[in-house]
Amino acid sequence: MTEPQTQDQPPANRRWRGIDWPPLVWKRRLLFALGATVVALAALFLAWISFKATDFIVDFVRGRLWVIFLISPIGLAFCAFLTRTVFPGSQGSGIPQAMASLHMDDPSQVNTVLSLRIMVGKVLLMVLGFMSGATIGREGPTVQVGASIMNSLGFFEIMRGKEMQRTLVLIGGAAGIAGAFNTPIAGVIFAIEELGHSFHSRYTAALLGAVVTGGIVTLLFASHLYFGSYNYFGTVHASLPVGLGYAAVALYGVVGGVSGGVFGRILALAPDGFPRFMRRLAFSQPVLFAGCCGIVVAICNYLSGGATLGSGYIAARSLLHDHATVGPTFAVLKYVAMLASYLSGIPGGIFSPSLGIGAGMGVWFHGLLPGVSLPVLAMLGMTGYFAGAVQTPITAVVIVLEMTNNQTMLVPVAATALLAFFISRKICPRPVYSALADKFLAATHAAGPTEPPTPPMPEHTV
């Protein structure tokens, strides 16, 4: 007598060497493909609208940069107000929320965190953040949007079950990362390395299939929107000569590890590590606190001549193609602006700004290492800072190589990521996303199963 199969178990009569799959298997595969297609289209839309929002603020302040002192404080304060009143639970990156949902046993809590209302609020407030001049990225919100879209497939009876729900969230997050940058391999690696430490190998094919489907959709539609061929940074022709040039690996491994580790530790400890007056302001007047963060962002934007507006994509791309449009202070100002933006509590990711900061660090030692070009230093800086801030070294290597379409830098990039990761771990023992996911889980349990968490500060740093 055979055991009855649960919904999360693959049918026992599947023929792996043929195509005679039962209808249930075909229906699930079609739903996975449909969900991945919608996620890819959503990722393209978020990419397009974030570029448009950045273009708007750049054009608006051109020739009158002083107005940023009005736009950023008011915009960030208004955005924080909306996150607490109209769209509670939409604040922060989106990746910690997706990670936290993987550890929730109550499906209703997952549905609350990944609800349609929060997804819409995430997108609208992210656009408002870009238009306010904040230093944010779109990839974190794209992950949460992707997870929400895939989680909605649980409406179908054949896609229900706790294990299936976790799989849907994981696949949605992976497809979101892949679609945000057109980096399918990085999407899979990030899903396994960061999002799903306990991912069941049974669903590997579903994960790969969803990412491939999303990649095909991205390639088909990207050229009709804003991105041309949608190769994020284009093809970067750079190589590191063997010899003294490898001192750059140690240099940027240390710099990236220290600066990224400090960034992660600040976010993980906030607000407990703040001075008393800042902690009181953050708890008692979160909207006013966000406005103060907006002043810091405005100062950075003004001192940089507007270069720190948005995600940092333009500056990073110029450095990777050996055409520096920013100076040595750009990375420092971008670093401070990103901290202020995230402490304000507005929605937005840290992937793109981290890449911009790391590329800006390439300017610091340009000309000091014989035979090492600016694009090489920019790539090493991107890898070192990203690995230090997020503490996902494999993802850092893959995403930088995919974005630049450069495989010749594999060895120095991998060595930089590994060194930065180890140094960052000494400064910030717990990865920032994991620490923020723990805070989100604690806030969710305190709020109950039907209400999204709205703590004054812990989620402001997510």
Image (cartoon, grey):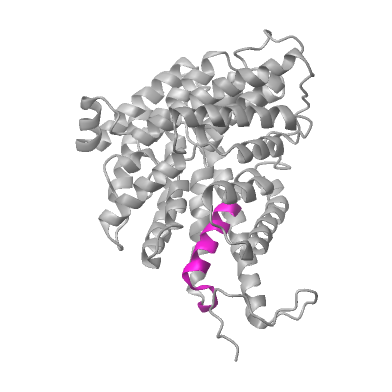
Q: For the point 26% across and 37% down, which residue is it?
A: 286
On the image, the x and y values in percent for residue 17 come to 80, 74
On the image, the x and y values in percent for residue 120 come to 43, 54
Q: Which residues are magenta?
A: 157-175
Q: For the point 21% across and 25% down, which residue is it?
A: 277
- Position of residue 297 in the picture relative to residue 150 (left or right): left
Magenta segment, principal secondary structure? helix
Image quarter (top left, top right, bottom left or bottom right) of the C terminus: top left
Q: For the point 60% across and 45% down, which residue is it?
A: 180
On the image, the x and y values in percent for residue 279 come to 24, 31
- Asked if the magenta segment contains residue 162, the reply would be yes
Viewer can see residue 113: yes
- Vertically, is 74 above or below 141? above
Image quarter (top left, top right, bottom left or bottom right) of the N terminus: bottom right
Quarter of the image holding residue 40?
A: bottom right
- Vertically, is 426 above or below 216? above
Which residue is at the front of the view, 30 or 415? 415
Which residue is at the front of the view, 253 or 360? 253
- Vertically, is 435 above or below 330? below
Viewer can see residue 75: no
Quarter of the image holding residue 370?
A: top right
Which residue is at the front of the view, 207 or 212? 207
- Vertically, is 217 above or below 432? below
- Position of residue 253 in the picture relative to residue 279 (left or right): right
Q: For the point 65% across and 39% down, which residue is it?
A: 399
